[in-house]
């Protein structure tokens, strides 16, 4: 499952090591001020995290969409999940990617969410070795320097191989960083697309097909760029007494989809809502069982 595999890989990156950063050099600043290049002409910026503590009750209702804040923040496995999906288009109206934005409330304290593997709680268990689906291999500082991968004391990087719907294999280095902000924490990530083509760590995708015997065959790799986002966790303790052990979880993701992946069909977009809903409900059940 494409969405699950991508976020499973991110879980291994963003929660294997918690590194914190502040200031102008943070990855969050890069994503919100400079953005992510989908193509030569399309660069998208992520909206900054919404600080819910500064919102009025009516603004919180707006944040919950048609559900209303009381229903949205209910302590229930089936409490609503707000989801907004948009196509990313170039200047000619051609679709080049997806903007994925969703938020929900989970009744767990921020300190406990931060201590646990939040991304794995949402999207499954990490791969046990490099042969597993969604494999992720941590890179050493020496490896990063050798391959021209940007390094930072506050950034954690690794090489990922992510299959998409058994039709595309996406490979590349993903950098992650955890940033503390007011009453919350932001787990940021992005695909590193500055590595020279031909390098073994360069971002690329390959088509996956089946031969006459049913064996999976990987096709010729193509360059790839345009993926990143963040997961924002913030405590609702200051909102109202009934939410003193609850958090708002919000994800914003940008994903470039080359036309050759699925022939400009709605295939990917049609899968997102159910996958998000299933992942969030599974997470809530797990947390409830551990309480």
Image (cartoon, rainbow, N blue to C red):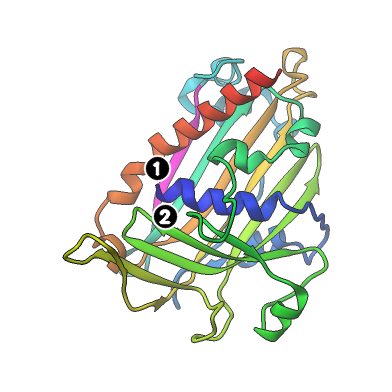
Residue 152 drawn above or below residue 79 = below
User: Are the residues flagged by discs 1 and 2 in contact, CB closer than 8 Å?
Assistant: yes
- The secondary structure that most of the magenta stretch takes on is strand
Give residue 241's position: percent from left, percent from top.
77, 13
Q: Which residue is mark 1?
A: 272
* Disc 1 to disc 2, C-alpha distance: 10 Å
Sequence-first tag of 1 and 2: 2
Considering the numbered disc 2 on the image, is that residue within a helix, a strand or a loop?
Answer: strand
Left or right: 205 as drawn, with respect to 171: left
Quadrant for residue 35, please give it: bottom right
Left or right: 280 as drawn, with respect to 233: left
* Residue displayed at 65% across by 50% down: 48
Residue 136 drawn above or below residue 290 = below
Residue 259 visible from this viewpoint: no
Of the two numbered discs 1 and 2 in the rendering, the one whose residue sits closer to the viewer: 1
Give residue 212's position: percent from left, percent from top.
16, 65
Residue at the left extreme, as displayed: 212
* Residue displayed at 61% across by 41% down: 120
- CA neighbours of label 2 inside 10 A, class few (<14), some (14 to 19), many (20+): many
Pick whichever, 262 or 210, lies toward us: 210
Query: Where the C terminus falls, by quadrant?
Result: top right
Give residue 257's position: percent from left, percent from top.
38, 62
Residue 98 tag number: 2
Considering the numbered disc 1 on the image, is that residue within a helix, a strand or a loop?
Answer: helix
Give the residues drawn in magenta, as a range: 80-87
Residue 282 visible from this viewpoint: yes
């Amino acid at each position: 499952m494409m969405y699950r595999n991508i976020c499973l890989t991110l879980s291994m990156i963003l929660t294997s090591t918690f590194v914190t950063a502040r200031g102008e050099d943070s990855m969050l600043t890069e994503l919100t001020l400079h953005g992510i290049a989908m193509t030569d002409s399309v660069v998208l910026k992520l909206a900054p995290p919404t600080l819910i503590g500064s919102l009025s009750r009516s603004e919180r209702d707006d944040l919950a969409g048609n559900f209303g804040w009381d229903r949205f923040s209910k302590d229930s496995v089936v409490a609503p999940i707000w989801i907004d999906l948009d196509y990313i288009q170039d200047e000619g109206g051609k679709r080049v990617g997806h903007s994925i934005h969703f938020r929900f409330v989970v009744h767990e304290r921020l300190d406990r969410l931060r201590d646990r593997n939040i991304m794995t709680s949402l999207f499954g268990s990490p791969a046990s070795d490099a042969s597993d689906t969604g494999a992720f291999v941590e890179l050493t500082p020496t490896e990063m320097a050798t391959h021209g991968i940007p390094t930072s004391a506050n950034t954690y990087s690794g090489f990922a191989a992510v299959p998409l719907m058994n039709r595309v294999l996406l490979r590349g280095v993903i950098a992650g960083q955890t940033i503390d902000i007011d009453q919350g924490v932001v787990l940021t990530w992005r695909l590193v697309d500055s590595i020279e083509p031909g390098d073994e760590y360069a971002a690329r995708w390959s088509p996956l097909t089946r031969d006459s015997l049913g064996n999976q065959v990987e096709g010729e790799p193509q360059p790839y760029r345009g993926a990143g986002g963040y997961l924002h966790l913030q405590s609702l303790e200051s909102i109202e007494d009934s939410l003193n052990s609850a958090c708002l979880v919000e994800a914003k993701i940008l994903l470039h989809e080359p036309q050759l992946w699925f022939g400009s069909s709605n295939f990917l977009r049609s899968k997102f809502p159910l996958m998000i809903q299933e992942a969030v409900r599974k997470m809530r059940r797990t947390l409830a069982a551990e309480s």
